[in-house]
Amino acid sequence: MNQRFMSLATLVLLVVLVALPLLFILLQAIFPHFSAGEFSGAFSTVGALLTEPQLPAMVSGTLQIAISVALLSGAVGLPLGVARGLFNLPCPRFWDLLFLLPFLTPPYIAALSWMLVLQTNGFLMQFTGIDLNDVLFSKSGIVLVMTLNIFPVVYFAVSRSLLASGQRLAQVARVHGATACKAFCHITLPLLTPALAAGMLLAFTLAAEEYGVPAALGTRAGVVMLTVGIEEKLADWPIDLPGASLLSLLLIVIALSGWWLQRKLTGDKDVSSVSGKPAEHVGARLGLAMPPVVAVMAMVGLLAVVMPGLSMALTALSGTLSGGLSMDNLTLRHFSALFVQRGDALSALGTSLSLAFGAAIITGALGLCAAWLVVMQKVKGRSVIDALSLMPAALPGVVIGVGLILLWNRAFWPVSPYNSWGILLISYCCLLLPWPVRYIASAMRQLGGNLEPAARVHGASAFQALRLIVLPLVFPAMFAAMLMVFAIASRELVTSLLLAPAGTQTVAVFIWRQFEQGSVGQGMAMATLTLCVALVLMLTALAMLQRSARQ
C-alpha cells in the first residue's frame, strides 16, 4: 500500500461521506425544486430568508451560545486535563471514564434530567426547598447544561496530548533553574496549544449544531438557534427544504470561521515534543494540593454526571412523576417493561451498539489516514482533505440526514444503502469523522519530524512507518477519539429518526418514541440501561488495552 493509493482511497471516502451530501444540500439551497429534479429558480428563496424576522435572533443566539460554551469548556476542561496529564492522581482511569459518561447521555436526555432536578417542584426542591427554575430556563442555564455535556472534548484533548508528549522538556527547564510556573507557561502550555484549540473548536461546533438542549430549554428562555429553525422548516407543513438548506449553509460558514481562526492561531506554530521512543508516563506529585484538586474534579463530576444520572435513575424508578420521592412511588415496572415489548428494546440496544462500534472503527481508521496525509506527509490537496474532515461538525444531524436522503434516494444508483442499516452507519461516520481527525492530528503535530524519515532511510515503506512508528505514538489520542465516537453514535437521535428503515430501531429512536407517547419513566429506564451497558463495554475495552500494554 503506497502513499498515492492511500491518498486516493482517503479522498474517495471523504467525497462519498462528506462532499456529495454537502453538494446535494448546496444544490437544494440554490435550486428550490432540486428535490423534484428541476434546476429552475436559482437563488429565488434567498430574499425571503434574509427578510425572515427570526433570522438575526437565530444567528446571534447560535454565536453567543457556541462561543460561550467553547470558552467555558476551555475554562473547565483545560485545568482538569492538565491535572490528569501532568500529575499522579488517584485512580486516573476512573476520571477518564467519569468524564466520558456525558457523551453516553443524549443531550435531550440531559436537558430533561436537569429540568426534573431544577424546575419548580423538581427533585432539588423536594430535597432542599431550593427552586432554581429561573436559572435553568435562561441563556446562562442553556450554556451551563451544554458545557457540562461538551467540556470533555477539551479535557480529553489536553490530557491525551500531555500523556503522549510527556514532560521531558519541562523537566529539562526545571533542571536549568526554571520554576514550575515558568516551565508550565513557557514549555507545557505552548505544546498544548494545538490540542486545546482543537478541543475548543470541537466544543464550538458541537454547541452550534446542538438541537436537543435549545429545543427543550430555549422556548422558555427566549433563546432561538439555527438548529431549531432548521428543524421547524423540516417538521412544519409545508416542508421548506430550500430554507433549511440555506440555514445549514450559514452553519457551515460559522463553523469554517472557527476553523479558520484555529488555523490562524495555531496553524503555523507546530511544536515537537516526541523525538524517539516515548517513555512511560511519570506524573508529578501534587503533595498538599492533592485534596483540593481531587475535590474540584469530584465537584465537576457531581454536576456533569451524578446529578443528571441520578435524576434519570429516579425517574426510571418512579411509578409516576406526580407521586414525588416516596417509597410508595418506587417501582421496577419501567425496567421490566423493556424486556416484554416483543423484543423491541433489546433489539434497539443491539442495533445501536453494533452501529456505534462500526462507526468507531471506520472513523478511527479514516481519521488516522487523513491526519497522517495532512500533518506528516503534507500531500498536495491536504487543505481539501482537512476541510472535508471538519465540515460535518458544522452541520446538525437533521441536515446530514436530509443530504443523505437527497443523495442516495435516487433511481440512477445501481446500488444504494438507502432504506437499510448501511445508511445509518454512513450517517454516523459522516457526523463523527471530525473527532478522530482532530485528536489524531493534534497528537501528530507533537511528533518530531525525524522519526518517519529515519524509518524510511532504513528501508521501511511509508505504510510500515505509519504502522510501526506513528500509530503507536498517537494511539492514546486515537483510542480516546474512538471511545467518544462510540459514545456519541450509540445515542445519535436526529439522523436515526430520519434514516432508520422500517422495522429498525435504535436506542435514541426507542427513547424518543416513549417520550412522544408520554412514557417518560420507560424512556429514562431505557436510557439508564443503555448507559450501564455502554459503560461496561468501555471498562472491558480499557481493561483489554491495559492488559495488552503490559504484555
Image: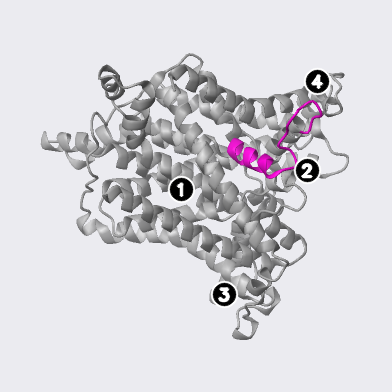
Sequence-first disc among 2 and 3: 3
The amino acid sitting under disc 2 is: Glu
Secondary structure state at the residue bearing disc 1 = helix
Q: Which residue is mark 4?
A: 43
Q: From which residue to which does the magenta span run?
A: 409-431
Sequence-first disc among 2 and 4: 4
Sequence-first disc among 4 and 1: 4
Residue 505 coordinates in the image, percent (x, y): 70, 54
Closest to the observer, 372 or 517: 372
Q: Nearer the viewer, mark 1 or mark 3?
A: 1
Dots 2, 4 in contact, CB < 8 A: no
Q: At 48% from the left edge and 57% from the top edge, which residue is drawn? A: 537
Q: Which mark is residue 539?
A: none
Decide: few, some or many residues near mark 1? Use Cα within 10 Å; few <14, some 14-19, many ≥20: many
Dots 2, 3 in contact, CB < 8 A: no
With respect to residue 521, does 160 lie above or below? above
Q: Which residue is mark 3?
A: 129
Farthest residue to the top: give it.
380
Dots 1, 2 in contact, CB < 8 A: no
Q: Residue 31 appears in which quarter of the rendering?
A: top right
Secondary structure state at the residue bearing disc 4 = loop
Q: Nearer the viewer, mark 2 or mark 3?
A: 2
Q: At 73% from the left edge and 26% from the top edge, which residue is drawn? A: 24
Res. 448 in view: yes
Spatial CA distance of label 4 from label 1 is: 40 Å
| Quarter of the image with the N terminus in it | top left
Q: Which mark is residue 232?
A: 2
Dots 1, 3 in contact, CB < 8 A: no
Secondary structure state at the residue bearing disc 2 = helix
